[in-house]
Amino acid sequence: MSIIELKNLTKTFGSEKAVDRINLTINNGDFLTLLGPSGCGKTTTLRCLSGLEEPDGGEIYIDGRCIFSHEEGISIPPGSRNLGLVFQNYALWPHMTVNQNIAFGLRKANLEKHVKEQRIRDVLSMVSLDGLADRYPHELSGGQQQRVAVARMVITQPNILLFDEPLSNLDAKLRMTLRAELKRMHMTLDATTVYVTHDQIEAMTLSTRIAIMKAGIIQQVGTPQEIYQFPANLFVADFMGNPTTNLFHATAQKKGAGIELILDLAREVNLSLPESENIHDGQKVVVNVRPEDVVLHDPQTPSQLQLKVYTTLPAGSEALTYLRTADEKSEFIVKGPEEKHRELHPEMAVGVTFKKGNIYDADGGALLYSFETGNAQMH
């Protein structure tokens, strides 16, 4: 295990800053995922850490040892950083067998032959490739080839494991299987892991912590639950979640000892909150409510927002229902048990309430307030 520290890390390509003064600490045994849209700087950050790219500024430390410093002119070569890297493409030697590809990582290790052979057998078993040692890459499936790439990395027993979108070329079922393999392997090896992906489900299921990036800047670092339930700003709220979250523009008004949010929907809908020092009278805000936190009701229930069903998408145990306001200018999504959504049909009216959500400043996007049914009333 190792502690990684990035201090004011910067990388520029031409006039564009791919990584903009990043400060990040990755703890011993962390499985930290760099997550964000294409072009946000996550792969560049990983490549700077690995030594494949040289930053234009900042410092990188591993266990307190400086491996890069722009000011001091320090740049430890990749082979001396004691880390392993798995790429998006498998990068296997086509003329070598599985056994030879894995053993390639040990070519410089001063180990006796029987020790090397035992280590190869152990790694093959770890990645579920028993019995395939004599096959060539073209005789393997995509998932098996990726397992070989992982085995070739871990056989050198690096302190740090780096993954650059290793599952993106695989089909959905295989990705799910290999996610479980990677998580099990991380727990077995107890190695500090840095993982790059744009797939939110991968990040949520694999990580102990997630760092969300946008335009080379880290927007939020936290556990998967913190990132999902309490996004630090509007970008994180909108980016996280599949399906996408519901965002409602509103205006805050002072009302007695509390705050009234008037939602910009087809008719006036208010959300009453206790007084908050972060929300001011007349302030423009955005209310974020996850699809699973929207509750469907009979439209005759009083004090509920009534909407028409646009369409329902069943997906086994769950279903997504798209609702629209009467003027069809506003649409949002409800997620819940399929049996509850199955009987809904177009033009059917339903009532809804919100279980919980977050409120953001419409201008700066900062998180202002988080509410649950107990501290907010929709009417």
Image (cartoon, rainbow, N blue to C red):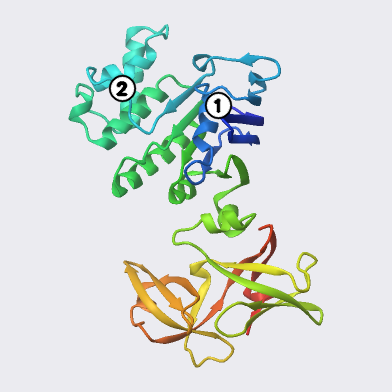
Where residue 47 appears, x then y in whole percent? 51, 28
Which amino acid does the dot numbered 1 rest on? Leu
Where residue 223 appears, x then y in whole percent? 58, 48
**Dots 2, 1 in contact, CB < 8 A:** no
Residue indicated by mark 1: 49
SS at circle 1: helix
Q: Earlier in the sequence, mark 2 or mark 1?
A: 1
Quick check: can you spot residue 132?
A: no
Residue indicated by mark 2: 121
| Rendered image: mark on residue 150 | none
| Front in this rendered view, residue 94 or 15 | 15
Q: Residue at x 72, y 74 (%)?
A: 252
**Residue 233 sits above or below residue 24 on the image:** below
**Residue 229 sits above or below residue 18 on the image:** below
Position of 179 compared to 57: left or right? left
**Quadrant position of the N terminus in the picture:** top right
Where residue 191 appears, x then y in whole percent? 51, 30
Which amino acid does the dot numbered 2 rest on? Arg
